[in-house]
Amino acid sequence: LVSSSGEARDQPKKAATVKPNVNRFNSASAMRIAKMQVDAGPRPAGSKSLRRVGEKLRKMLPNGRFEQVPGHPGLRNIVGSVDGTGPVLVIASHYDALKYPRGSLGANNAAAAVGAVIELAKSVGKMRRPAGAQGIRFVLFDGEQSPSPKDSDFYTQALRGSRAYVRAHAEEVQALVLLDYVANKNIRLPREGTSDVALWDTVRQAAQQVGVGKVFPNTTGASIIDDSTPIQ
């Protein structure tokens, strides 16, 4: 498991900008997708504004579709896919914004990550992948944020979309890479404390190959309960 949700608390205050030597990722388009979500206003799980945004996001993902979240009427995950063999890799974020405090626009939590997931999906969808390549799913979880202002038990009150997805698809998934809080300037992403070490090493090696290895320092941050937790 790789989760990037702890990076904002661990990044250095003064970190040099890192530029890739290979770039198939359309950052401008990812930013437009993030802005579209923020411009829609507060988007807590189950709200009309989130449903409207969800319709737009579904159309952006390859083979995009909704999956209802059982036990939570009105909540729905958005799933896109690139065909391949199983078990699959899941690249995910959540797309709902905080309900409390009221008025949250969720720019970095997690509209930016949603834009990144969608642009990754577009990029992978254009690649000529070899026969037998692993299938990839791009999942936007609903209901990640807690519906309660007290937030006494985040795992059971929140993470509604990811827990439902794992219940339905755990046997189909080999690994999950979760994006959250990824829009910080000069970002650094240490390994989240519960993330799989071997998968994290693979991510770091890939980053080094395209010249952005410094973004992923060989350090470990805090352990965080997040949408990666249910599949661990």
Image: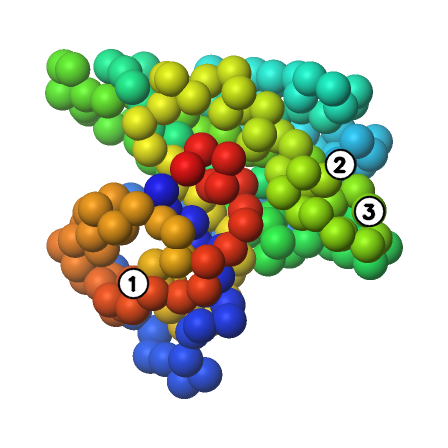
Question: Where's residue 76, x and y in %?
Answer: 67, 23
Residue at which label 1 appears: 216
Quadrant position of the N terminus in the picture: top left
Q: Give the CA distance from mark 3 to mark 1.
A: 34 Å
Question: Where's residue 161, x and y in %?
Answer: 62, 30
Q: Give the CA distance from mark 3 to mark 2.
A: 12 Å
Question: Where's residue 66, x and y in %?
Answer: 61, 18
- Residue shown at the point (53%, 20%) measured from the top left: 167
Q: Is residue 157 left or right of residue 174?
A: right
Q: Is residue 170 above or below residue 16?
A: above
Nearest the camera: 34 or 155? 155
Specify the amino acid type for callout 3.
Ser
Lower sequence index among marks 3 and 2 = 2
Which secondary structure, mark 2?
Answer: loop
Q: Is residue 90 above or below residue 201?
A: above
Residue at which label 2 appears: 45
Q: Is residue 37 left or right of residue 8?
A: right
Q: Residues within 10 Å of mark 2 (few under 14, many from 20)?
A: many
Specify the amino acid type for callout 2.
Ala
Lower sequence index among marks 1 and 2 = 2
Specify the amino acid type for callout 1.
Phe
Which secondary structure, mark 3?
Answer: loop
Which secondary structure, mark 1?
Answer: loop
Q: Are marks 3 and 2 in contact (CB under 8 Å)?
A: no
Nearest the camera: 79 or 71? 71
**Circle on res. 148:** 3
Q: Give the CA distance from mark 1 to mark 2.
A: 31 Å
